[in-house]
Amino acid sequence: MDGKETPETWKVKGSSYSNLMSWIPMLTGEQLADIPIIVASIDPCISCTDRVAVVRDGTSGILTKGDMTLLSREKTRRMTSVAL
């Protein structure tokens, strides 16, 4: 504080930030369809997230919300065709 009513420097860290590194071992090798329940198990608060960074076999990329929706639908189709 600099003696005024507003802080001179303000660093904000969301409470879920500390849990982010635990996602790596929790999600490694899991199916895409299992990710929501795994992530929900640590009760994150992630606002405005519409993409995810993926690193697999040393290669990285970005999945958009549309990509994730498409992958989820494909997984659901595979699961329902096996169940029949």
Image (spheres, helix red, strand yellow):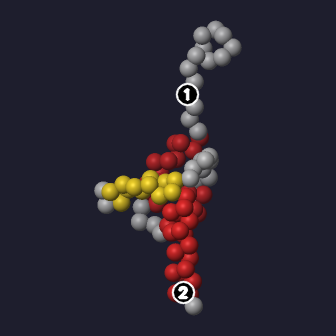
SS type, badge 1? loop
> Can the viewer see residue 34?
no
Question: Crowding near pointer 1: few (<14 within 10 Å), some, many (20+)?
Answer: few
In the image, residue 38 sits, relative to residue 10, either above or below, namely below
Residue 37: image x %, image y %?
58, 63
Could you say where residue 57 lies in the image, as x and y percent from the top left?
31, 60
Residue sitting at the far bottom? 84
Asked where in the image residue 3 lies, by quadrant, the reply is: top right
Viewport quadrant of the C terminus: bottom right
Name the secondary structure under disc 2. helix
Amino acid bearing label 1: Lys
Which label is found at residue 81?
Answer: 2
Q: Earlier in the sequence, mark 2 or mark 1?
A: 1
Quarter of the figure with the N terminus: top right
Residue to which mark 1 is pinned: 11
Residue at horizontal 55%, vertical 27%? 11
Which residue lies most toward the front here? 66
Q: CA distance from mark 2 to mark 1?
A: 50 Å
x and y percentages locating residue 12 in the rendered image: 57, 31
